[in-house]
Image: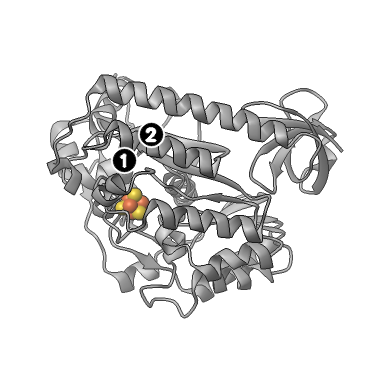
Amino acid sequence: MHDKLLYIETFGCQMNVNDSERIVSLLADCGYVSTGDPSVADMILLNTCSVRGGAEEKVYNRLANLRIYKRDGKKQIIAVGGCVAQQEGEELLRRLPYVDLVVGTHNLHLLQEMVQSAERGERRSETAFIDKEQRLDLFPSIKGESRLSRFVTVMQGCDNFCSYCIVPYVRGREISRRSSDILEEVRQLADDGVREVILLGQNVNSYGLKGESDFSFAELLCRVAVIDGIERIRFTTSHPKDMSDELISCFGDIAKLSGHIHLPAQSGSDFVLKQMGRGYTRQSYLEKITKLRSVRPEIVVTGDIIVGFPGESDVDFELTLSLMEEVRYIDIFSFVYSPRPGTKAAALNDDVSREVKKSRLDRLMALQRQHTREISQEMIDSVMSVLVEGEGKLPGQVSGKANNGRIVNFPGDVSLIGSFVDVKISKAYPNSFLGER
Ligand code: SF4
């Protein structure tokens, strides 16, 4: 009997990438193995994201394209997961008769039985949010082949309700996982040969603040750091307002903690930050960056910026550019604002024209390219500790991530995979470095 084939497409953030890994692992128990070819798949699953404007239409269009593989009476399951599935629910089944399953963001634990019903020809949508107590037991570990670097979910959901963001509505309220479960999972990963863990959540640094854990996020980092075999710890994503002094001091105290932080500012204008409901000011954001650099001078910072938020004036936008000059991000994710139905900001007058949004985005990206180039050039001749993860871009090279999260290629053979190697940087590219041992 041949294995059943699963084709999965993932959109959006790291949480979704992690969920897709979990889906692959859950469906392996139902006899599915992954394929990159939708035309031969027994099941197609879109793991969707609704953070950007127009996301729902894109999902409907993509499903319409994929449906061609189901023609000619082929028995193929089409499933939709993630945030658009959560938002649309039954509507997806109603509008698209060829969709079999809709699985919401809190319902992955039902996926196996849903697939079994779909194999019997039943169509089903499950999008109910489950309560916190039940959810605490539903952060299943991802089974599968051991790798060097793995994500470990520490919390889910978000209580911040930034005015532009759909996440709290589609991912649900915030909940922290039990520290004992997290530490047990990290220990098991270390036993399986994992060398780096990336602690994951929508807002990791509010871990434990709602009372589900006896630890703060800083204490959790300290406990993970003493687990033998784990040589590097990273985390994503952090909210500036929850970046406590205790957590900042971890960057000075814990050598295993990566020298990179992703700290989304979104804007450099206090007026816009207030409209966004972000809960911090430009000044307090910059103070946190200064403190981080005082305990870890070489730390690299990445961020997110939204341009063209309702009411953003030329002066507000200039403040964002000047914030970028002060912080000097090595990289940013930049977005043009578009209203997400159901959010608070959708009720505001979207008064920045498309042309102005585009020209602001162009200026912002040009400034970022300049900063990336300059910061990367400054790193030439420095020595970075690289966890070698695989073969490099060119024959005879290997590739891995430096302690600051940047990709480094250097001459070496595959026997180095899995080890940490000190590499002297000789050349900087926009998204990677070249070096030598
Ligand atoms: S912190 Fe704000 S932007 Fe981030 S997920 Fe929560 S609501 Fe969305």
Q: Residue furthest front?
A: 315
* Residue displayed at 59% across by 52% down: 150
Residue 52 placement (x, y as % from top left): 30, 35
Q: Is residue 265 above or below residue 360?
A: below
Residue 91's spot in the image, x, y percent? 14, 39
> Cβ of disc 1 within 8 Å of ligand 1?
yes
Residue at x-position 38% and y-position 70%: 136
Q: Nearer the viewer, mark 2 or mark 1?
A: 2
Q: Is 209 situated left or right of 420 in this image?
A: left
Quadrant location of residue 55? top left
How is colour applied across the structure in the image? one colour
Q: Which residue is mark 2?
A: 318
Q: Report the front residue among 88 and 31.
A: 88
Residue closer to the observer: 117 or 275: 275
The kind of residue tagged 1 is Val
Residue 73 seen: no
Please identify the quarter of the rendering in which residue 314 is found: top left
| Label 2 lies in ligand 1 vicinity (Cβ under 8 Å) | no
Q: Is residue 137 above or below residue 330?
A: below
Which dot marks residue 51? 1
Query: Is any part of residue 89 visible from this angle?
Result: yes
Side of 369 relative to 146 (left or right)? left
For mark 2, give the secondary structure. helix
**Amino acid type, callout 2:** Glu
Residue at point 57%, 60% (across, down): 291
Q: Sort mark 1 into few (<14), some (14-19) or many (20+) by Cα contacts within 10 Å.
A: many
In front of the other: 90 or 114: 90
